[in-house]
Amino acid sequence: MVNIVITIKVNEEIAKLIEKMIELGIARSKNEAVNLLIEYGRAEIEKKIREQEEVIRLADEWLKSGFPYKRLNTSDLREERYE
């Protein structure tokens, strides 16, 4: 596949969506974020952002107050969170 460079303008809402994708680790760059938006569509990306924000919120809550389940091995969760 050949990559072709193009220059585009997006509205502020889309620019914020792209930045949020990078912030949450859904995309590593603006280029990757735009390509994901094109490939999957805005609705799917917004759904992914909501899911990722919920994962981060729960992980932070669990790290502060403790995991809500007793005698459950959570080492893999901690390892993933800090990679």
Image: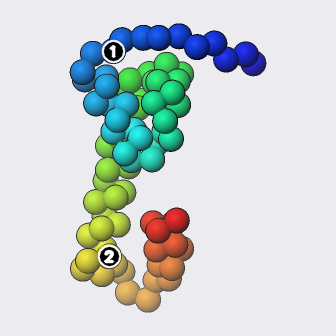
Determine whether 62 is above or below 27 in the image: below
| Residue found farthest to the right | 1
Taking the image as shown, residue 29 lies to the left or right of residue 68, namely right
Res. 46 visible in picture: no
The mark lying in front, picked from 2 and 1, is 1
Q: Which residue is mark 2?
A: 63
Quadrant, the N terminus: top right
- Image coordinates of residue 39 in percent, x first then y, are 53, 22
SS for callout 2? helix
Amino acid, disc 2 = Leu
Determine whether 53 is above or below 9 in the image: below
SS for callout 1? loop
Q: Nearer the viewer, residue 32 or 7?
A: 7
Taking the image as shown, residue 22 lies to the left or right of residue 13, namely right
Determine whether 9 is above or below 65 in the image: above
The earlier-in-sequence mark between 2 and 1 is 1
- Image coordinates of residue 5 in percent, x first then y, are 58, 14
Taking the image as shown, residue 28 lies to the left or right of residue 49, namely right
- Image coordinates of residue 27 in percent, x first then y, are 48, 39
Q: Coloured how? A: rainbow
For label 1, the crowd category at 10 Å Cα-Cα, with few meaning under 14, some 14 to 19 and many 20 or more, is few
Q: Determine the CA span between mark 2 and mark 1.
A: 37 Å
For label 2, the crowd category at 10 Å Cα-Cα, with few meaning under 14, some 14 to 19 and many 20 or more, is few
Q: Which residue is mark 1?
A: 10
Q: Which residue is at a point 46% across and 42% down the rendered structure image?
A: 26
